[in-house]
Image (cartoon, grey):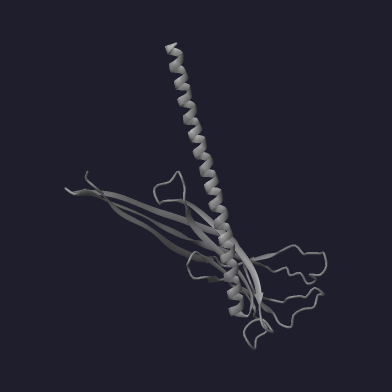
């Protein structure tokens, strides 16, 4: 009987340990999914506002892509360290009064920007091209047409530091906790533009794209997160 009782207790302890791991994994999955969904939705709203403001300021069409690097809370990372994640979204907004572009011009009015975190937005290069209406009518002048990003070489490096110090006196024990993350992103934007223009966009015959690749554009940004807390524990 004693042997059976010991075995039952051991089995119960093992099952409880496995159940705890499963609960922790489930909680981590739900937390990560919720954070990713919230970050993506927030990034979409920020991208749309940036595109709307840029289109208004430029009096034309703005294609705005915003990329945000996050350190999401994670159950399997260090205190305040978080887990690296990224959200990116793009919006195309037109807001113009009269002819698009600066006053007195007819060859401008389309702009494209790419931004990461709080770094200055990068204006993508343009190529002069004729534009065609749905009926095939050609524009009077070539219009500066922005290129598009087709690949991002993104390198991300996070440096994490954590320190917990304790100082004891006759009255109490003082604790100081400090954590920091230096999140660095850098790389190149690869842009291109389709040179095989559809001269009859109203029909169903879309020509095969033929791309002209532009020179890569360098980008970089550094984000710093800090956490500091102090407390004391009096002696009994």
205 in relation to 105, above or below? above
**In the image, residue 102 above or below residue 61:** below
Percent position of residue 197, x then y: 73, 70
Q: Is 120 left or right of 130, judged from the image as shown?
A: left
Q: 37 and 62: which one is in front? A: 37
Q: Give me the residue at 47% from left, 56% from top.
A: 156
Q: State whether residue 65 appears in this view.
A: no
State left or right for residue 131 relative to residue 153.
Answer: right
View extreme (left): residue: 170
Residue 76 on image: x %, y %: 45, 43
Q: What residue do we see at 34% from left, 51% from top?
A: 162
Q: Is residue 180 left or right of residue 4?
A: left
> For this rendering, which residue is in front, 166 or 217?
166
Instruction: Identify the image quadrant of the N terminus.
Output: top left
Give the residue furthest to the front: 236
Q: Quadrant of the C terminus?
A: top left
Q: Is residue 171 above or below residue 102?
A: above
| Residue sitting at x 82%, y 75% | 135
Q: Position of residue 103 (x, y in %)?
A: 63, 87
Q: Residue at horizontal 42%, vertical 12%?
A: 2
List the single residue furthest toward the top. 1
For residue 223, side relative to residue 50 (left or right): left
Q: Toward which corner of the image does residue 59 lie, by quadrant?
A: bottom right
- Relative depth, front residue between 234 and 33: 234
Where does the image place residue 213, in percent across and percent down from the top left?
62, 65
Question: Is residue 102 visible from the viewing direction of this image?
Answer: yes
């Amino acid at each position: 009987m004693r042997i059976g009782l010991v075995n039952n207790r051991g089995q119960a302890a093992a099952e409880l340990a496995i159940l705890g791991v499963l609960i922790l994994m489930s909680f981590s999955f739900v937390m990560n999914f919720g954070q990713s969904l919230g970050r993506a939705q927030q990034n979409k709203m920020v991208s749309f506002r940036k595109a709307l403001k840029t289109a208004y300021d430029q009096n034309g069409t703005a294609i705005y892509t915003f990329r945000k690097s996050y350190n999401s809370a994670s159950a399997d990372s260090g205190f305040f360290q978080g887990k690296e994640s990224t959200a990116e979204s793009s919006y195309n907004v037109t807001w113009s009064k009269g002819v698009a572009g600066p006053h007195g011009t007819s060859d401008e009015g389309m702009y494209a920007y790419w931004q990461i975190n709080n770094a200055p937005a990068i204006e993508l290069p343009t190529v002069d091209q004729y534009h065609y209406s749905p009926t095939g009518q050609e524009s009077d002048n070539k219009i500066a047409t922005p290129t598009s990003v087709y690949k991002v070489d993104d390198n991300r490096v996070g440096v994490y530091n954590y320190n917990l110090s304790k100082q004891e006196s006759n009255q109490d024990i003082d604790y100081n906790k400090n954590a920091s993350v230096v999140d660095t992103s850098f790389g190149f934007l690869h842009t291109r533009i389709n040179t095989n223009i559809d001269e009859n966009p109203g029909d169903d015959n879309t020509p095969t794209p033929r791309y002209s690749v532009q020179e890569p554009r360098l980008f970089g940004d550094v984000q710093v997160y800090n956490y500091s807390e102090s407390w004391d524990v009096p002696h009994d």
